[in-house]
Amino acid sequence: MKFYSINRRSPSVDLREAVMNGLAPDGGLYMPEQIPRIPKAFFNNISSMTLRDIAFVVTDMILGKDIPSAVIRQIVYDTFSFDIPLVGLSPDVFSLELFHGPTKAFKDIGARFLARVISHYSSRSPSRKVKVLVATSGDSGAAVAAGFHGVPGVETYILYPSGGLSRSQVARLCLPGSSVKPIEVLGTFDDCQRLVKQAFVDRSLRDNFGITSANSINICRLLPQMVYFFYAYAMLSAREEMSGKHLDSPVVFSIPSGNLGNLTAGLLARRMGLPVDRFVVANNSNDVTARFVTTGEFTPRRAERTVATAMDVGNPSNISRVIDLLEKDHETPEACMRGYSLTDSEIEEVIRSVYTDSGVILDPHSATALGALRRDLREGEKGIFLSTAHPSKFPKVIERITGVRLEPDNLPPAPHRSAPHPRISVSYDALRRLISV
Ligand SMILES: *Cc1c(COP(=O)(O)O)cnc(C)c1O
């Protein structure tokens, strides 16, 4: 499979190059040239397939020409090593719990998959060490650290701004004996990103090592996220069959949206043939995508801080992928999407009411998705919203709204003290010295 740059000023590349480049030389994001259609028969027995079986079929259709099928099978086996339950809140509304991985958020899935694909390519040229660089301003670093921990043949450097992370966030980057190495930078997140970019264009570094990034725009973080849309559909079908029925209601997915990785993955799944009636794009008060869906106009804006912080995004990095997919299909946004935005107090009201009605505690991001779904879902339809993080990641908010103190053992283990790790000034030479070993 070839992958093209959305800006179309760089040549198309194979999977290996798309993964290793991250971003095309012309600054565009990569997309697969063909989106294969899954045969209709696949959906006849999807309800009896396991998560790993579905993951293999879906990813093999896109990556199968580039990676041997046996390797893909192992990669999805290792990536999808935890359950993704579908929890019914009412006969028509379901929560797809994507937070049962090591760092309790859906970003685990993309990070684990990408780590294993990079490791596969690194094992094919063992004489050339692969270095993964990533800048983080918060939780995505933990997902990358956990995803790359113990993956052979890859050394990972996570740059974070001094003072920019909480102590437990730093501790989660420090996995003992790991090939994942945190680096504290005496600067801002932007400084960290600039240093990473400098490493990418450093020819003499690239002569000695394979240099790549694990940031969220990498196509191999996106592709495994298609899997859970199919799996959710499978579980919904299985439920219907258990009560002697056949799933024939329209299915609506509601997606708590920030940088639009999940929305892009959902649109790809639909293009592959998944019967989705429409997607609900759920924003907090940073509503640029909801507006785009409603008006067809995209106007980036400065992000403001909300209670659902991972969606405080004013210029979503995957918007060009969404627009590209729509243009290719000659579809307008309103043909397959609806957009809603919720204020902080509306998000909190959803958390409160779900807890009161059903005893389920949702994190603020998942609650945003449910709130939008409730506005959109019509009689006779089935709605699934993505639950993207475990509520125990937001203990203060949850306690303030519900009065419930979530057990700390719901959190991933954080050592009391971070292992010692290097601290550098905002100097490319200092970074270079650390990584050229
Ligand atoms: C990253 C994140 C989102 C936003 O997902 P995108 O794919 O970037 O739109 C939503 N919820 C949580 C908990 C997140 O960490």
Image (cartoon, helix red, strand yellow):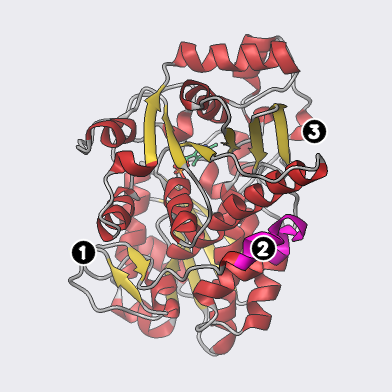
Which mark sits nearer the N-terminus, 1 or 3? 1
Q: Viewed as shown, does residue 159 lie left or right of 401?
A: left
- The numbered mark at residue 7 is 1
Q: Which residues are magenta?
A: 41-53
Identify residue type, mark 2: Ile
Which mark sits nearer the N-terminus, 2 or 3? 2
Which residue shows up at 75% across the image and 52% down it?
Answer: 82
Q: Viewed as shown, does residue 47 lie left or right of 64?
A: right
Q: Nearer the viewer, mark 2 or mark 1?
A: 2
Which residue shows up at 68% across the image and 74% down it?
Answer: 73
Q: Viewed as shown, does residue 360 lie left or right of 393?
A: right
For disc 2, the marked residue is: 54
Q: Is residue 433 magenta?
A: no
x and y percent of residue 11 in the render?
A: 24, 79
Q: CA distance from mark 1 to mark 3?
A: 46 Å
Q: CA distance from mark 2 to mark 3?
A: 31 Å
What predominant SS class does the magenta segment belong to?
helix
Q: Secondary structure at mark 1?
A: loop
Identify residue type, mark 3: Asp
Q: Viewed as shown, does residue 33 lie left or right of 57?
A: left
Which residue shows up at 52% across the image and 39% down it?
Answer: 253
Q: Nearer the viewer, mark 2 or mark 3?
A: 2
